[in-house]
Image (cartoon, rainbow, N blue to C red):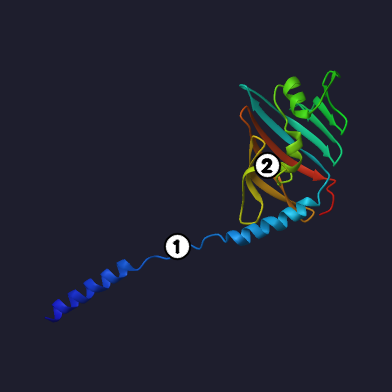
Amino acid sequence: MTSLRLSCLIFCVSILQSCVSVPPSKPIDAIASQGLNQQHLNKLQAISQFSLQGRIGVQYDGRGFSGGLHWQHDATKDNVELFSPLGGQVAGIKKTAESVTLEDGNGNSVSADDVESLTQRILGWQLPLVGLADWSLGRPSSSKIDSIAWDDFGYLSSLKQDGWSIEYQNYSEQNGVFLPSKILLRSEKVYLKLLVEKWDNLSQP
């Protein structure tokens, strides 16, 4: 009888244990993450100019380009220089409020209304310079946002805007603010990788 009761007791305990649900892992606090993102964006909004040096890789229409990039940006103008892997200048792009000009490595100069159509016509691929000025800093531009996501620290992890899907893979600290160091951008026809090796001349956040 004692043995039977003991068996029943063990059976009941095992049933009770099987009914106890394991508590789920604590979910990320979306509100806190959103707050961190807003704090980070507030710092980024104070940046109106920058210089960067890095490398750019482009795949388009079964072809590709990779090389160095020097870019100076402020609220009124851009100066972009593209270099071959050996260091020779492939193109220089100058954008002001009045004009956009591209000069190739042979000194030939061509002008257009915007950088996107100019680079498409001369280089064969589109450089989205208007949006890239914001995207390179890790913030959306002023146009419509199709989707956006950020990580636990409030830094952008992905963004869809103006026909481009942007993925952020690395950040580095620059003067107290974290800025992207590796960005992947995809459009319908272009895959672009931007590696930032050096930030400089940042307006203070």
Q: Position of residue 70 (x, y in %)?
A: 80, 35
Q: CA distance from mark 1 to mark 2?
A: 36 Å
Q: Position of residue 182 (x, y in %)?
A: 67, 42
**Residue 114 picture quarter:** top right
Residue at point 74% right, 43% down?
134
**Residue 158 picture quarter:** top right
Q: Is residue 119 above or below residue 197?
A: above
Q: Is residue 159 left or right of residue 95?
A: left
Q: Residues within 10 Å of mark 1 (few under 14, many from 20)?
A: few
Q: Is residue 24 above or below residue 180?
A: below
Q: Position of residue 63 (x, y in %)?
A: 64, 22
Q: Nearer the viewer, mark 1 or mark 2?
A: 2
Mark number, residue 143: none
Q: Is residue 176 above or below residue 181?
A: below
Instruction: Please name whichever residue, 132 or 107, is drawn nearer the observer in this view of the structure.
Output: 132
Mark number, residue 24: 1
The residue that disc 2 covers is 144
Asked whether the residues under the numbered discs 1 and 2 touch, taking CB atoms below 8 Å apart as contact, a structural biologist would say: no
Q: Quadrant of the C terminus?
A: bottom right
User: In terms of sequence position, does the residue under pointer 1 or pointer 2 come before the other?
Assistant: 1
Amino acid on which disc 2 is placed? Lys
Q: Is residue 29 left or right of residue 110?
A: left
Amino acid on which disc 1 is placed? Pro
- Number of marks drawn: 2
Q: Position of residue 184 (x, y in %)?
A: 64, 38
Query: As drawn, which residue projects farthest toward the bottom?
Result: 2
Residue at point 39% right, 65% down?
22
Query: As drawn, which residue projects farthest toward the front?
Result: 144
Q: Quadrant of the N terminus?
A: bottom left
